[in-house]
Image: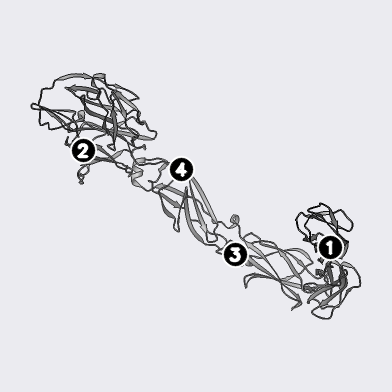
Amino acid sequence: MALEIKNISTTINSVSCLFDIVPPVTHTNWSYSLSGGSYVLYSQTDSYRINCTITGLKENTTYTLQARAINASTFLPVISSTVNFTTKKSTTAPTVSASITAATAKGFTINGTANYPCRTWQYQIDGGAWQSLSATTSATSVSKVISGLTPGQTYSVRVRATRTYNGVRGTSATVNATTLGASVLNSVNTVVADDATVSVTFNWTVPAGTGFTHTLRIKDGGTTVVTVTGLTGSSGSKTISLNGTQRTALLNRMPNKKSFTGTFELETLDGSTRVGSLSTKTATITTTEENSAPTFAGFTHSERNATIASVVGISDYYVQNMSDIGIDYSAATAKNGASLKEYGATIGGKTVTSVGLSIAYGAPTVSGDAVNITVYAEDSRGYKTGHIASVAVKYYSNPQIVSWQARRKDSIGETVSLNVVFAVRSYLNSNLSGKKYRYRKTDDDTWSSWLDLGAVTQITSTMTDFKMYEFSDDDWEIFDADKSYYVQIWCSDNIGGEAYLIQFTIARGLPLVSFRDGMVGINNFNPTCGLDVKGGFKTDEFIGLTEVAYPTLHNDWEPFDTSHYARPEVTRIGNVCFLRGMLKQGIITKNTHIATVPQEFRPVRMHLFTMTAYNNAGTQGQIRIGIDGKICVNGNWDLPVSATYWNLNLFWTLGT
């Protein structure tokens, strides 16, 4: 049994081969040794042969390879004979670059560089024959001075060289070389066209000893704007000044733009004959806000809303969202060839513009003690001159209906009492200018006409920056006691704001006990027998009043007021108990204990009832009374934050 190395294949930095056990017997822990070095574990595969690739080798180098494997059954090693292999040689060509330096009127220096040592360096000019650039046998850079060329002429140059290591040639890209002839414009500084004296500073290269003169043209696109002739000098930085006519020509070229990119064109002349080519550079030609912004003296502002003026009076403030601010500008004057474009005014985030000297800005959308009115005059270039005035803008909100209470007198009658509190923003002469109401029956679709609510009284305000007014009338309106009504109330102030109207419900009058000739009704307006209880109990037998008691209240529930009809009272007539009262809302979460009735008034089974809330929504909530006499919240109520009061109007029997 032997381990053989077969199928050897190399690259410039790797070798691939087959390790093969002959005859085939399963081995493991395959490893190799390079040039007598330590064995390197390659694979722990259980097999009689594996493919092996070794990387990271040196280019063009001879190695000795030996393999080893462990018999999977006997755990004895088997070692191959050594074999030699050589990695391949790179055929990569050198990267050759050409550059030109030290140009003169009749020549320049050609520089060649390569990324590998090279021999046989050559150059070529304008596609002609290749000529020797250097006789060196191994170098990465060479150079040669070329002479006898034509001044002001541009030549194409290439360089090539052969890599010493592998004899592969590389050729550079073509570069252009120009012999000195015409002067060269290297750079131009930004030109400020609206300076009192306009300077043009540039850097140029002038062939020494030529005696050339120059013409400099300043262009906008293809149009020549300014021409300066007779320029002379030596290489380096040079500054010239434009005359008044040239300055005006520049400014008149840019009446609607702050700046433009100008083309500066330098022509070299030998007498009157052009030498070589034109040399051009671009640079910014600009104006400045400091020199060219329009002159603008200022503005005035005033209130143009007569209603606001009458309410606010002679004051130094405006009213948010309601004032109509007028702006009057002093006439502005554009400068340095520009024209006046517009005037503008900004308050907060709102800007209004005009081409005239007066503008109706309208209402400010922000408020504060120091709100800036910022105005400006803008010219055709976009330069602005502005002024700021700080003014007070009072916050405004629409009038409010702060609170309201409406209920039937004694909970049952047709006369309804009403109390409403209004609030309006407090200004010098502000007041509540409108307050009206309308109503309809809940089973009717037709509203009454709007009616004036009547006189209100100004009261001490509990709200900062508001005036408050109260309407209160115990005999406000007559509503059919057997019907429930929707009521809407609306108000406005004398500035022009309106309150969102409110709507609430006047529930029908629901007497706990109604007395008719020889008859008594419980929760029944029109009894038909001696005792007629809504729900089905009727009798003509004599039933005496046996007892009256007062339930105990819990969890913040209490009588709505001190009147006798507000205090909860439970009355027993025969074997029927009825409970009435008007309660301020307490805790309303599920199973909250509201009240407890005495022992002798307690039912023999649980009853469920509904209480009605006298508020703006006519909400109802379900309660229960158990055999223990506890009246509790039944389930979770979806209720308003607070009800005016809850009408307690219940009855139950003591028998089965």
What's the residue type where badge 1 is placed?
Answer: Glu
Q: Is residue 620 visible?
A: yes
Is label 3 in a helix, a strand or a loop? helix
SS label for mark 1: strand
The quarter in which the N terminus is drawn is bottom right
The residue carrying mark 3 is 251
Q: Which residue is mark 1?
A: 4
Mark 2 surroundings within 10 Å by alpha-carbon count, few (fewer than 14), some (14 through 19), many (20 or more):
some
Q: Separation of disc 3 and disc 1 at Cα?
A: 91 Å
Circle 2: residue type: Ser
Query: Residue 216 appears in which quarter of the rendering?
Result: bottom right
Picture coordinates of residue 204 (x, y %)? 75, 66
Looking at the rendered structure, the secondary structure element under dot 2 is loop
**Which mark, residue 484?**
2
Q: Which mark is residue 391?
A: 4
> Which is nearer the eye, 449 or 344?
449
Asked whether disc 4 touches disc 2, contact meaning CB atoms under 8 Å apart, the reply is no
Q: Earlier in the sequence, mark 1 or mark 2?
A: 1
Q: Kindly report the distance in space between the C-alpha atoms of the residues bearing marks 3 and 4.
A: 39 Å
The amino acid marked with disc number 4 is Val
Q: Residue 405 location, x and y as percent?
A: 27, 33
How far is the residue under mark 1 from the one under mark 2? 110 Å
